[in-house]
Image: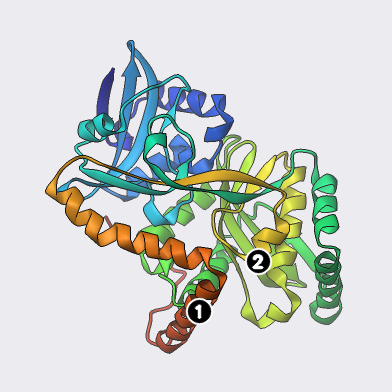
Amino acid sequence: MKITVVRPGELGEQEITRWREIQKSSPALDNPFLSVDFTLAMGRLRDRVRVAVIEDGGAIAGFFPHERHAFGVGRPLGGFLVTCHGVVSTPELKIDARELLKACRLSVIDFDYLVAGQPTFAPYETDVRPAPLMDLGSGFEAYVEQVRAASPKNYKTVRYKERKLGREQGEVRFEWASADVSGLHTLLRWKSDQYQRTGRVDRFAQPWIVRLVEEMHACRSEDFAGVLTMLYAGDTPVAGHFGLRTAQTLVGWFPAYDPAYAPYSPGIMHHLHLAEHAAAAGLHQVDMGKGDREYKDWLKTGVVMVAEARVARPSPTAAVQWVGRVPLSRLRTTVVDDPRLFRAADRLLKTYGRAKSRLRPRFRSQRPTRTR
């Protein structure tokens, strides 16, 4: 077994081709956040990104994209920004996780969105739970029939609101894979405002994240692309989403809508149109990501298992990092699993967000300067 750690930009064509071959060979790896294209983009924007190239018997058997922070603290690629992490490897690869960390010069790494059951990290999994999917493998009509059968009242209400939106605000239309950069910036502005209203961390206050999304939006290939979708009433955008796709899977990333149209439920409306167009484009599923949201529970027709895990080598850094992270992680899990605590925490965050939103800078659509 040989492990070589490089920057993404140092990967050669042979390694890039091999990465794509390995990813395509396993359905569990069919997620755009595990694609070499995403890792290359992150490497262009962040100096701390590394890739462990794993060779077994002289042949490349896997890749482990990650971030190396100060004092040997590791983070999965993209950290809190993405919803899938793991080793991109052949099924038969067996490597000790601590030996992998040692080769990467890492003392500790925590995962919140790990591909469940990977041999390298399975012994360290601390929590495994389902993430909702929109299963489009049998086509849109089969999917929507499942949604309608599971909650006929909700489905009927959404379709009624769609007709009402069309009558009162203009004809409803949906745009799939829009190349409109101004539409993308409209969506990011909605999302930034949502983060601030609800007391969450505003991702788009960080220019490198805006730059990443812009670069992903410009990606167009059969196996990897950014997909911007927008729902309009007349000529007015009312809801949208930006995500990434492979040849078969679209991953939910940044959904948002204009709060002025909230009474029409444009977000749910948008997702039904999204499913229809995704199926027409040949996609088999829409991964909505781990998280308890009512709309996800209503729209899901399948699940994928996602794990939390922590791997540490004995060191002072790992001990200090445990104190700062693990108790908070356990508290978060307790809150999420208790509906009463979750509702109370959500209300508190929204109150905090309203109080501070006037003081925070808003997302600006001009192209940001590159930062590291």
Q: Which mark is residue 64?
A: none
Quarter where residue 331 is shown: bottom left
Q: Which residue is mark 1?
A: 344
Residue 200 percent location from the top left of the image = 44, 72
Q: Nearer the viewer, mark 2 or mark 1?
A: 1
Direction from residue 129 to residue 125 in the image, left or right: left
Quarter where residue 89 is shown: top left
- The amino acid marked with disc number 2 is Glu
Relative vertical location of residue 353 with respect to residue 29 in this rendering, above or below: below
Residue 310 percent location from the top left of the image = 33, 45
Name the one closer to the observer, 48 or 294.
294
Q: Residue at x 42, y 27 (%)?
A: 16
User: Dot 2: what SS?
Assistant: helix
Name the one closer to the observer, 342 or 372.
342
Q: Quadrant of the C terminus?
A: bottom left
Q: Earlier in the sequence, mark 2 or mark 1?
A: 2
Direction from residue 367 to residue 69 in the image, left or right: left
Disc 1 crowd, CA 10 A, few/some/many (<14, 14-19, 20+) = few
- The amino acid marked with disc number 1 is Ala
Q: Residue at x 54, y 59 (%)?
A: 291
Residue 274 percent location from the top left of the image = 71, 55
Q: Residue furthest left?
A: 316
